[in-house]
Image (cartoon, coloured by chain):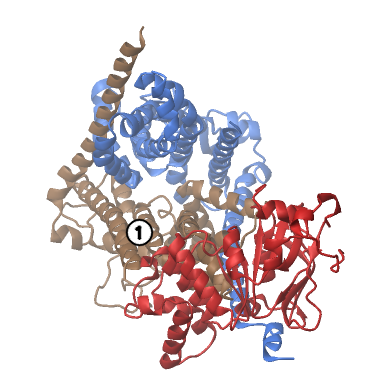
Amino acid sequence: MNAKLADKIATTVIYVIAGMVALVLFSMLGFILVQGLPHLSWHFLTSPALSFEAGGGIGIQLFNSFYLLVLAMVISFPIALGAAIYLNEYAKKSVWTNIIRTAIEILSSLPSVVVGLFGFLLFVVQFKFGFSILSGAIALSIFNLPLLTRSIETSLAQIPYLQREAGAALGLSRWETVLHVVLPAAVPSIVTGVVLSAGRVFGEAAALIFTAGQSAPALNFMDWNPFNISSPLSPMRPAETLAVHIWKINSEGIMPDLNLVSAGASAVLIIVVLIFNFSARKLGMKLFKKLTSS
Amino acid sequence: MDSITEKIKRQSESTRKDRFGRTLSWTALTFIVLVVALIFAFVLSRGLNTFIANKVSVTDFLFGTTWNPSVVNPKTHQPFVGALPMIMGSFLVTFLSAIVATPFAIGTALFMTEIAKKRGAKIMQPIVELLVGIPSVVYGFIGLTVIVPFMRGVVGGSGFGILSGTIVLFVMILPTVTSMTVDTLKSVPRHYRESALAIGATRWQMIYKVILRAATPGILTAVVFGMARAFGEALAVQMVIGNAALMPTGLTTPASTLTSVLTMGIGNTVMGSLQNNVLWTLAMILLLMSLVFNLIIRMIGSKGELK
Amino acid sequence: MTNPNIDLKPLSEFIVDEAPERYIYDMNSGKHEVAIATKGLQVRYGDKLALSEGDLSFERYKITSLIGASGSGKSTFLRSLNRMNDDVATVSGKIMYRGLDINSADIDVYEMRRHIGMVFQRPNPFAKSIYDNITFALTQRGRYTKEQLDEIVETSLKQAALWDQVKDELNKSALALSGGQAQRLVIARALALKPDILLLDEPSSALDPISSAQVEDTLLELKKDYTIIIVTHNMQQAARISDYTAFFHMGRAIEYDLTRKIFTRPKVALTNDYISGNFG
């Protein structure tokens, strides 16, 4: 077979493959959006779910997802930031540093269900937190830590070493330079990383089914005292999230309109992830412009 | 002594701040390492209970073909805890989905980086990136509402099974493997391409003989990464595989994976019982497998460096 | 040690065989005020010895150039003086400053660097405004009124010959400055701390000739109040601005003398080869 013919055949094959993949990916997105979008309404987004009859909403699940997301971010961000600073600014090349990096890599590749089981064992059972927002938020944080750490570390590493040298030559310690020079310069790319990771956390389910639980008790949205169990802010109440809800109603198969609810909920998940992805880039670019111009 | 020498000998505020910051960030890092250690300690200690406290033999567990922990085998007076059906299930869906996904991912990545750069960057790139971030339950839901009924219509039966699981995982890992492959292909230096084309190679010869060869370690890493994701995926697979802890006899009969049995079972067993301990042993296998995948990725990485 | 009293021969009679291996100018004769001096300085990167035997004294309110081929150890020497190499290398030996060995553990290196400042090859302003670039290090460690800060900004920018060009846009990002302006801002930033000694590591090598000349003018102006030690690969620059010159070769200070002597009749054959362009 001559080379020209082979080239033509191969190019065609690549076109066909890419076309098929595009078709699959497009039709998947299309399927969810076509099925789900018509079902979205103010009522669907705000009212509580119904188990045995049609017409239920996803209000509480939606609130839970965002609440857990915020808590998980509040817990994991400072830890990830600290760890990233140490790794990028202080750690010298040594066997220890290598072991620590490996440990973080392993944590990032752990199946999220294992993280969930660990959370179940330690927080739900051992610490007697029960199926609760608190247990769920900690499990999500553990799930989020390694990737967030890596992303912040990459952001810090992008800031030229010259900036650190400049700080040192002015008699500033590494910490002062990092805090006031390196971090501000890295903010755009850190923000992008944080928002992208928020998208992942928002859709995570396997780490939550045994920690935040699979039930969404009714909430009293007039009561914002976190110590009341029916308050939306209560950290000790069980909290099924949107992603867990999709999994649960489908595995149970009881809800009469479960396909519609799942499609609607999936559409919401995808739209939120879409917004996160989009705003991560926009926000990062905007911050970067603000930083480099006057 | 002038004032400068006095100052230089005293500990400055910068030194104090630096010590504080160093300690603080070190604590954060140590915390993460501690969490990893705790996860290992907990899962291993629970998982090994099956063999230590319940005295199940390791070979019976790994190679036994019957899984029914609440029933005692009258011949051996041991419960049926053969985990081979789930181990097989997990490995089957993982390898099959990776085998199917690899050519698609490479083809799409080549399309995006070598054949149609503009369209690739404009249309495919955002779609692929978006799909990397789609929650796995969404994939499971699509599997349940589209793929399972489709399989039911084509091959009959319930529609649940290894094949449905494979298809769901294939679609799920495809964006990840594709986008990692794209990164690898992009990192092949430009002069490789130029020198190949300069000696009169066709585009395909350049791709096949130069680019793919240079990118092999990276592509392998992407595939192993996808496999690790597929192996550890719980909910999407659990929704379509049928959850029957039986030795897989075909690709279209209900089966189960390590993760699906875990998600189904952990809430229905009593802590400390044998039925619960064996589930932790399954979790331990998951943990060890993710170590193995990690090791493979490292080995590929170090081999790639040698070239 | 070499004998400093070796008799001088005209360059034409210079015979390589009789040339000394090393010549180090004797600074400690009472009539010079020494700002900083090294004794037995050795720098190692891992197992590799990068610099040895750099016994040099630097006179106060003078400019001293360090010249030599790349890899000769001149930058390593300079960076050791305010311990910028601490993180990457092992530095042994003494660095005497105001009667103290500053290369010892009980010295606070951050405080020390405020008195021995440094400017690098590539301009490295912070991603902050021009004003904040200058005041940042100050406000990190002390309380200043707005008036005091304004005054410091103005003085140091004037010293660095940048004031007239930027006085109306002090709040502009420093990243918007041209290379030459940025480098002078960096010098102003170092001056704002009122250091004793200013170390410059090829400060004009990344600049165009005009900016480079501006930086040179600035340095000559600064000599009145500061001791300046500058690494340069540009021999004309060394000859133009410095009072003393040290020639480094393969990790050793080979010859150290008054600049006019180094450039007219060097005592060591290697120095002669280098400045006449026979190698490097």
How many numbered dots are placed on residues in this image? 1
Query: Image height check: is C113 above or below C17?
Result: below
Nearer-the-camera pick, C124 or A260: C124
Q: Which chain is red?
A: C
- Three-letter amino acid code of the residue under disc 1: Val
| Corner quadrant of residue C117 | bottom right
- The quadrant of the image that shows the N terminus of chain A is top left
From the viewer's perspective, tell me whether residue B190 is left or right of residue C140: left
Which residue corresponds to the image point at 35% horizontal and 8% vertical from the top-left?
A: A2
Image coordinates for residue C137, horizontal then vertical, percent:
51, 79
Q: Which chain is blue?
A: B
| Residue in the foreground of this view, choosing between A93 and C137 | C137
User: Residue A291 appears at what percent x and percent y?
Assistant: 35, 67
Color of chain A here? Answer: brown
Is B62 above or below relative to A265? above
Residue furthest top in the image:
A1
Q: Provide the chain ID for the residue under circle 1.
A: A
- Residue under label 1, please give it: A195
The image quarter in which residue C57 lies:
bottom right
Frontmost residue, B52 versus A40 = A40
Q: Position of residue A22 (x, y in %)?
A: 25, 33
Q: Tell me: B124 left or right of C87.
A: left
Residue that appears at 41% across and 28% down: B193
Callout 1 crowding tier (Cα within 10 Å): few <14, some 14–19, many ≥20: many
Q: Is residue A110 visible?
A: no
